[in-house]
Image: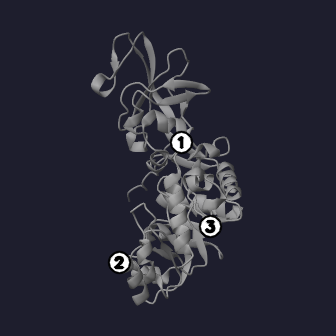
Amino acid sequence: MSPPPLSAPEVPPALRLTCDGDALVANWRWLRTRGGGAACGAAVKADGYGLGAREVAARLIRAGCRDLFVSSWGEAAALGDLPDGVALSVLHGVREEDVAYALASPARPVLNSPPQVARWKAAGGGACDAMIDTGMNRLGLRPEEAGCLKGVAIETLMSHLASADEADTAFASRQRDAFAAVAACVPARRASLANSAGICLGADYAFDLTRPGLALYGGVPRAEAGGAIQPVMRIEAQVLQCRRVPAGETVGYGATWTAGGDAHVAILNIGYADGYLRGFSNAGRVFAGDRALPVVGRVSMDLLAVDATGTDVTEGDWLALDPDLGAASAASGLSQYELLTALGRRYQRRWT
């Protein structure tokens, strides 16, 4: 008789992603307050912006959030059962392939086009949401197409701001006015316009329900949120090797960084496969305690080099990536949205 197979030992993580549940809830509460009397929902699409949709939703529901938004029916299914009184909206609407699942699901489709409206009517669908395009020219019915919604039971009529995070808010103001005009003519229980940046613009953009995303997760969409929005995510990578790089030698692909003097370089177990993208090459920073260490050379698929000269950083140490999404965005040229949603699968995710 063959001996039983040996069980594999648990593999210690080399990447840690720690999420602060208290900070997440504090951000949602600030956004709710900023929206005046409007209800405050939460976008948990893209797996909770990379942090884990189920974990995010559970914490926000306990805090009082009653409206969640995902992109697709697959994301709705992955979220699982929700408590009574919590509504889920599917932003991409209902394709022909989605009809059977959508009819059986408690989630509501957000109808975006005349064909989607006709499809939902023909299927005998019940309550739904609807998107009005007020200038973004992405998803949504044009205002002149809104007549096709006659006879549809609309729970939430919504639109989406295209540039509320820009300093010039003239376009956002035009969108707000255009949406208000349509909302006055289309029967719906609620109206919803503001994303995270729109919430920062004030109560005039809030209508009945706001739909924050980025700011929930620690992103700062406008200066008004600075100092109020707390970081939610902390990423730590382990040092695999430390090496002396003599003056004049280079580091990484393309030899894009040259040591000006003898350098103490630490190689970390993280790269663009983990969402730390090449925009950080020779531009990012990693922290050993309170000390910022510059990224040197190109970011590789699985590895990152930082100049740890003058520190006692050594193999096995854990270093933290920049938790300031705004600063990381400015350094890399990547949006705060990309920094969150590009996170890979190799992290040990944990919540505090």
Residue at (47%, 66%) from the top-left corner?
75
Disc ID at residue 296: none
| Residue toward you, 66 or 252 | 66
Q: Is residue 135 above or below residue 151?
A: above
Tag 3 residue: 209
Q: CA distance from mark 1 to mark 3?
A: 35 Å
Q: Position of residue 15 (x, y in %)?
A: 50, 40
| Residue toward you, 194 or 249 | 194
Q: CA distance from mark 2 to mark 3?
A: 29 Å
Mark toward the viewer: 2 or 3: 3
Tag 1 residue: 16
Q: Are marks 1 and 3 in contact (CB under 8 Å)?
A: no
| Residue toward you, 3 or 84 | 84
Mark toward the viewer: 2 or 1: 2
Which amino acid does the dot numbered 2 rest on? Glu
Disc ID at residue 97: 2
Mark 1 or mark 3, earlier in chain: 1
Q: Position of residue 101 (x, y in %)?
A: 43, 80
| Quarter of the image where the N terminus is located | bottom left
